[in-house]
Amino acid sequence: VHVPTNAIKLGAILIDSTGLEITSKTFGGGDYQFIASYNSAIINTHDGGFIYTGQVQDTSNNSASGYLFKLGQNLDSLWFVQFDTTFLNYGAQVRQLSDSGFIVAGTDDSLGHWQFFLLRTDKLGNRIWKKKYGGAGSEGAQSIDITADGGFVVGGNSSSFGGWLDGYLIKTDSAGIFQWERSFGTPEYEGLGVVAAAANGDILFSGIEYKYTDGQGFDYKQGYIARLSSNNDLLWKYFYGPEVTPSSGFSKLKEMDDGSIVAIGHIDEIDTLPTNNISGMILKLDANGNEVWLRKYITHDTLPSDNYFWDFDNTIDGGYIIAGHISVVTNENPLEYYQDSWLIKLDSLGCPYRGCELETGLIELNHNLKYDEMVKVFPNPTTAKITITGYYQLPATLT
């Protein structure tokens, strides 16, 4: 999301496999403020293009509605569809179906309170059906996946089950007919609710819960991941991250081809670092929820910075590509900061360089430098000339 002075615009950047930008475009402006959902707001489509979902706000009449926005291979805008304009709603995530149509999970307040919805469209965004789900409280959808039986599972949070915002998920068949639901949580606000389908029909769900010590009140929030059967049986549920952390949570999780599970998110390190950093986090589990490794990333150790991971995918070399954003405070009085998009390529061990799997604690990238000043080496690999760029005082040693 680009934030010019006059409007919030939707931005898309196309890069090559080495991280170099091919092209970028922005969309919207004037009275129209475009907002994308954080995790998996944009996905690849079968024709090699891309599709966005999120919310568009028309400041001229104070309306806000969900949308589908189709882009071509070179980020050309092809078509744009709004869901409903008579009440508030937004699209949380979109998935493409085998017939090239789309299924969108989102939230609307058409009944006077927020509820999940599923919207099924054809390949041009024309509505086929729309169905709503939830209780007497408020629900907020955050993620969707297609299950092994062709149905759908939607994750988010809910206030219909006694808590402020419990983790909440529903399961439907391929026609959107409700099958079952489950909630997780404590009486307090929980936050993130992210879902993923496993190949054997199981369902993975992650959320956040408040944690207490000896009844002395709130100590910290900790992220958890749970595995459920296709019949809503809880197989396991475990918390991850250090228990001294004020807050940790996951923004996306995914089952790998070997049955392992990878999740990304953040850890708030306010009690362990003098610079109050929030660290990006990537976690790998086996199929039974046992931790294989956990890595934390920051971009600065001398300036306060918040480092968030929002979306990821596995790459053909067995590694991972992660998208997020960083906010770095450059002057605390008055508060001044810059915010950048963040893209990081890791190997199969969750490392940006060889040997990091032997290290413990935070992995710092780009010491004392703004992210756009990091060293770049290209083309890589090469059999001829190579170019190295960066911002360093000379003399310098490159290894």
Image (cartoon, rainbow, N blue to C red):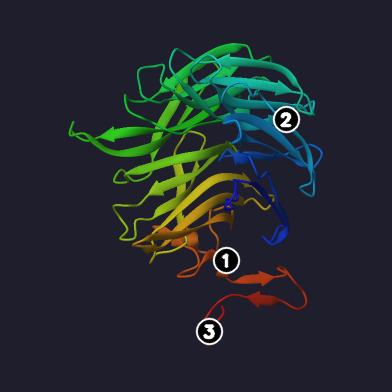
Q: What crowding class fits label 1: few (fewer than 14 Cα within 10 Å), some (14-19), or many (20 or more)?
A: few
For marks 3 and 1, give the CA distance: 19 Å
Amino acid carrying label 2: it is Val
Q: Is residue 172 left or right of residue 299?
A: right
Q: What element carries label 2?
A: strand
Question: In the rendered view, would you say 134 is above or below 164?
Answer: above
Q: In this view, does 297 lie to the left or right of 174?
A: left
**Do labels 3 and 2 touch, CB within 8 Å?**
no
Q: What crowding class fits label 3: few (fewer than 14 Cα within 10 Å), some (14-19), or many (20 or more)?
A: few
Give the quadrant of residue 209.
Answer: top left
Earlier-in-chain disc, 2 versus 1: 2
Earlier-in-chain disc, 3 versus 2: 2
- The residue at which mark 1 appears reads as 372
Which residue corresponds to the image point at 33% horizontal and 25% vertical from the top-left? 186
Which residue corresponds to the image point at 66% horizontal and 45% vertical from the top-left? 29
Q: Which of marks 3 and 2 is in front?
A: 2
For marks 2 and 1, give the CA distance: 35 Å
- The residue at which mark 3 appears reads as 396
Q: In which quarter of the image is the C terminus?
A: bottom right
Q: Which of marks 2 and 1 is in front?
A: 2
Q: In this view, does 12 lie to the left or right of 57?
A: right
Residue 388 seen = yes
Give the quadrant of residue 211.
Answer: top left
Q: What crowding class fits label 2: few (fewer than 14 Cα within 10 Å), some (14-19), or many (20 or more)?
A: some
Looking at the picture, how far across and down is residue 147, in whole percent? 63, 24
- The residue at which mark 2 appears reads as 81
Amino acid carrying label 3: it is Ala
Which residue corresponds to the image point at 72% horizontal and 68% vertical from the top-left? 381
Q: Is mark 1 on a helix, strand or loop?
A: helix
For marks 3 and 2, give the CA distance: 53 Å
